[in-house]
Amino acid sequence: MRKALDFFLSSIYLVYFLLVLFIFHPIQIICFELFGKRVHQKSVHWLNFFLLNGARIVGTRLSFIQKTEIPTNKPVIFIANHQSMFDIIGLIWYLRKNFPVFVSKIELAKGIPSISYNLQKSGAALIDRNDGKQATVEIAKLAKMIEETNFSACIFPEGTRSRTGTMKPFAVGGVAILMKKSPNALIVPIAIENVNKMNPKGFFPLKSFQHLKWTALPPIDRANKTPEEVVEEARKAIAAIVEG
């Protein structure tokens, strides 16, 4: 009975999800071409509002817990664990005041309505995982952009999703580049919980009636700390929430 319900509700949400992507694709183009990057990003925020809250179709509950005030007058580097593509949808909406831009694999920048266009135009670091030099250049460009605009960068140091919820090791390289090229950026860990439970086997079918949580944790004091120390402190803070 539960599987049948999951298939039924997921089918409705899949149609809704695709409809939202197709509707917002031309909206993004108009916003970017006529009004520029900041207005374009606001259209992206609303795209993700509808994608995120549409998950209520499958009985999903959503929580954003903010344990710190996040300033909007300086760049921020958000360090998060990674469980699902829905991680990103929540981060874009809940952190919208900081205009989050992502480190993403380059493959996602083609062929997906709305999502690919945003990655192309937002200043995202589109990295080729098989080309370390290219990845370094892309992340450095993102860091320079947030330093100049007071936007924020979001990075998943695990690199790939943890479908079990158990966190993978955090890599230092990407965070180190962001820290070096954006020396004024605040470091804020984000703990993401239960998102993996909604789509453990991919987008379809989704598991209904899950409670997804995003928690913004207190900033890490980066003064006199190496990137390795900052990343490990972020990992421990996130693990304390995610793994209890």
Image: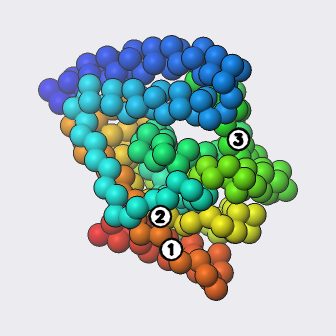
Helix, strand or loop at label 3? It is: loop
Label 1 neighbourhood size at 10 Å, few (<14), some (14-19), many (20+)? some
Q: Is residue 240 left or right of residue 25?
A: left
Q: Residue at x 33, y 40 (%)?
A: 198
Q: Which residue is mark 2?
A: 189
Q: CA distance from mark 1 to mark 2?
A: 8 Å
Q: Which residue is mark 3?
A: 123
Q: Depth check: give the residue in front, 155 or 181.
A: 181
**Quadrant containing the N terminus in the rendered view:** top left
Q: Residue at x 67, y 33 (%)?
A: 37
Could you tell me the amino acid type at mark 1? Ile
Could you tell me the amino acid type at mark 3? Gly
Q: Depth check: give the residue in front, 173 or 181.
A: 181
- Image coordinates of residue 38 in percent, x first then y, are 62, 35
Q: Which residue is mark 1?
A: 220
Q: Is residue 227 visible?
A: yes
- Image coordinates of residue 180 in percent, x first then y, are 74, 69
Helix, strand or loop at label 2? It is: strand
Could you tell me the amino acid type at mark 2? Pro
Q: Residue at x 68, y 29 (%)?
A: 36
Helix, strand or loop at label 1? It is: loop
- Comes first in the chain, label 3 or label 2: 3
Q: Depth check: give the residue in front, 108 or 152.
A: 152
Residue furthest to the bottom:
224
Q: CA distance from mark 3 to mark 2?
A: 21 Å
Q: Is residue 109 visible?
A: no
Q: CA distance from mark 3 to mark 1?
A: 25 Å
- Comes first in the chain, label 3 or label 1: 3
| Marks 3 and 2 in Cβ contact (< 8 Å) | no
Q: Quadrant of residue 115?
A: top right
